[in-house]
Amino acid sequence: MKEGYQERAGAERETKRGTMSPTYLIYTLGKLQIQALKEDYKRAKGADFSLKDFHDRFLSTGRPPVKIIRQIMLESELSGH
């Protein structure tokens, strides 16, 4: 509980949710995809990277799957737009 910075009851609840809820996998997968996109976008932007810009661009795409957002964001960077 010390490493998770949570009370025991909260940690146990999250553990059960993570191991018993099939929808938790989708949440975690989305989180990992967004983190990977952020790192790739950061690499593409180089010194011009801004976390605010990343968030603004990401949110401006609407609600398509992360795979589509990745194409939109990275293709525009690679093409110079």
Image (cartoon, grey):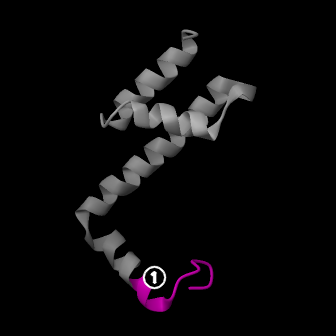
Q: Quadrant of residue 53?
A: top right
Q: What residue is shown with label 1?
A: 11
Magenta-drawn segment: 1-12
On whether residue 61 falls in the magenta region, the answer is no
What is the three-letter code of the residue carrying label 1? Ala
Q: Does 55 sit above or below residue 17?
A: above
Q: Position of residue 71 (x, y in %)?
A: 42, 23
Q: Position of residue 32 (x, y in %)?
A: 46, 48
Q: Is residue 18 left or right of residue 57?
A: left
On whether residue 4 falls in the magenta region, the answer is yes
Q: Position of residue 79 (x, y in %)?
A: 54, 9
Crowding at label 1, few (<14), some or many (≥20) Cα neighbours within 10 Å? some
Question: How many labels were placed on the picture?
Answer: 1
The C terminus lies in quadrant: top right
Residue at 31%, 62% in the rendered image: 24
Residue at 50%, 16% in the rendered image: 76
Q: Position of residue 69 (x, y in %)?
A: 40, 30
